[in-house]
Amino acid sequence: MLEKMKNFSWRDVDWKKVDYPRIALTAVFLLAMFLLGRAVGAATHRVTASSAIAHSPENWGLGFGDEGSQPSGNVSAAELAKYNAYYVGNAQDKVIYLTFDAGYENGNTEPILDALKKHNATATFFVVGHYLESAPELVKRMVAEGHTVGNHTYHHPDMSSISDREAFAKEMNDAAALYKEITGQEMTAYYRPPQGKYSTENLKMAKDMGYATFFWSLAYVDWYQDKQPTHEEAFDKLLSRIHPGAIVLLHSTSQTNGEIMDELLTKWEEMGYTFKPLSDLIP
């Protein structure tokens, strides 16, 4: 056989006797098998990747569409609801849910609270242990003025890297215990993952502890102290991207937020929005 192949020449083929239809059919069959193999491989890869995303650490992320419309999250609202977690409200209601992440105090919480009081708007402040330690009087003011104080963990770690239930619970319980020591009240069981880092297991652990987890549907880069956005930059993001049912994340450390809060709330009200607490989202 090898000897025959070695001596083979296309010039020796009798092309009149070649079965062209059979060759064509064979070629089509082989091409179909090749394409089917690729499709099955791609589908298997997608399923594997999807499974990995579901169980590995993630960063909360958003995709924005038309101005005024709700963004999509990297996990759907329906999927989050299985874990008592939320990122957006009803798409038909012109309601805004104001939330502030409070890692430390630098003089900007008071003007924010002043603006909220002026507009009779309630908000949720997600605080960490350092804030509770260093600004207990502001925490008491938040409570006295009808705001909710939620759990942002004690040390603000990457919670998605914590798989041990006891370690996860300690971060939450230590913050809640200090809050109770300061206010004499139980902390509302609302949780926001530091940096938006989470895993499916984290969501399960928070739910098992009785917490509702809150991500967000609108935020902007307001946390760099040496690179604060201008008023114009802040309004550009916060007005153009506002949408019905928005859970807005702002940082109480932002000087810009402290300066624009009264005007920002006024502009949102002029656009027809009202402000409600996060409790409005929980069935």
Image: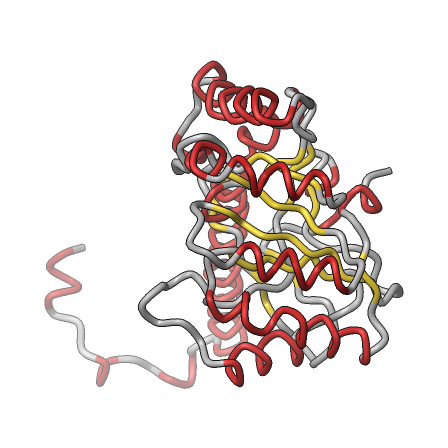
Q: Is residue 41 left or right of residue 272?
A: left
Above or below, comparing residue 172 to residue 114 in the picture: above
Above or below, comparing residue 48 to residue 76 in the picture: above
Residue 37 in percent (x, y) is at 48, 54
Residue nearest the observer in this picture, 82 or 16: 82
Kindly identify the residue that appears in the image at 43 percent across and 46 percent down.
104
Q: Is residue 254 left or right of residue 89?
A: left
Kindly identify the residue that appears in the image at 63 percent across and 36 percent down.
140
Kindly identify the residue that appears in the image at 81 percent across and 79 percent down.
271
Residue 13 in percent (x, y) is at 29, 80
Kindly identify the residue that appears in the image at 56 percent across and 59 percent down.
250
Residue 165 in percent (x, y) is at 49, 17
**Residue reaching furthest front?**
137
- State how the image is colored: secondary structure
Residue nearest the observer in this picture, 51 or 140: 140
Q: Quadrant of the N terminus?
A: bottom left
Above or below, comparing residue 159 to residue 94 in the picture: above
Residue nearest the observer in this picture, 84 or 268: 268
Residue 100 in percent (x, y) is at 59, 52
Q: How many marks?
A: 0
Q: Is residue 274 left or right of residue 180?
A: right
Above or below, comparing residue 205 to residue 19 in the picture: above
**Residue reaching furthest top?**
166
Q: Quadrant of the C terminus?
A: top right
Q: Is residue 140 left or right of residue 271?
A: left
